[in-house]
Amino acid sequence: MLLTEHTRDRIWTNDYPVHYAGLDFFSRMTVIRLIDDRLLLHSPCHISPALKAQLDQLGEVAYIVAPGSYHYQHIVSAQDTYPLAQTMICPGVEQKVPDLQFSEFLCDKVPDCWVDDFDQVLVRGAKYMWEVAFFHKPSRTLILVDLVENIGDKTKGVGWGMKFWWKLVFRMWNHPKPAPEYQLGWKDKVAARQSLLQILNWDFERVIISHGDLINHNAKEIVRQAWEVPLEH
């Protein structure tokens, strides 16, 4: 099975290998069945025929979401596979893929089409990245891409280069933190803090992230500790 069920009959994930900046690690697509029974692809991976067959069994893919500055690489693959789906992107993705066709930008205002499924926040204040965080209300699941990475001894598919940087440089090995691009600086810590506090006000119990191990226990405290630096006054 390419898809792993995360929340019974509601959320599935697919982990796939990536090579970026000379490093080998895994990324994660999340598939959410909305209340209207249609599907949303969050940070999609390449859609192979086998994966398409699984998705088609789950339902109609209605939405394709590029939720962060570095999570757009397979959007076109998803669009080619599901040409009738609407594509919604985090601001900044359009600069990296100028020819990308999309329906609208994601922001703090939740689109009417999934207002009963999600709350969302466009996280502001970082120097190098943008990201939209999602809270899936029915399952009380927070869905992030790079705002928290949880990579360590139990994480599969991590190359030696990643281990070096995460252990010795960024001190992130076995210590969940934002991606290095966030740690390189926050241009507006007040705006960042406001965004992150809004997320922490959501009543989430678990966290799906794009890189590293899922957070299924003590989720809010782990996230709060990961954001200790931008949350400082």
Image (cartoon, helix red, strand yellow):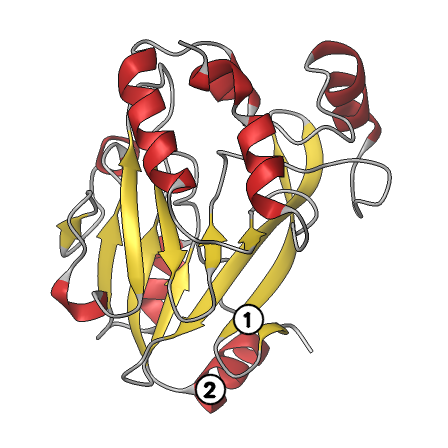
What residue is shown with label 1? 12
* Callout 2 secondary element: helix
Residue 10 in sight from this viewpoint: yes
* Horizontal and vertical percent position of residue 128: 38, 18
Q: Residue furthest bottom?
A: 57
Q: Quadrant of residue 136?
A: bottom left
Instruction: Characterize the local packing of mark 2: few (<14), some (14-19) or many (20 or more) Cα atoms within 10 angstroms.
Output: some
Disc 1 + disc 2, Cβ < 8 Å: yes
In this rendering, the answer to whether 31 lies above or below 54 is above
What residue is shown with label 2? 58
* Callout 1 secondary element: strand
* Image side of residue 34 versus residue 139, left or right: left
Q: Quadrant of the N terminus?
A: bottom right
The residue at 64%/55% (across/down) is: 16
Dot 1 amino acid type: Trp
Q: Quadrant of residue 174?
A: top right
* Horizontal and vertical percent position of residue 34: 34, 76
* Image side of residue 11 versus residue 14, left or right: left
Q: Quadrant of the C terminus?
A: top left
Q: Foreground residue, 82 or 126?
A: 126
Dot 2 amino acid type: Leu
Q: Foreground residue, 125 or 26?
A: 125
Instruction: Characterize the local packing of mark 1: few (<14), some (14-19) or many (20 or more) Cα atoms within 10 angstroms.
Output: many
The residue at 48%/77% (across/down) is: 10
Q: Foreground residue, 128 or 108?
A: 108
* Horizontal and vertical percent position of residue 65: 32, 56
In this rendering, the answer to whether 218 lies above or below 163 is below
The residue at 55%/43% (across/down) is: 220
Residue 46 in sight from this viewpoint: no
* Image side of residue 152 versus residue 107, left or right: right
Mark 1–mark 2 Cα distance, whole angstroms, equals: 10 Å
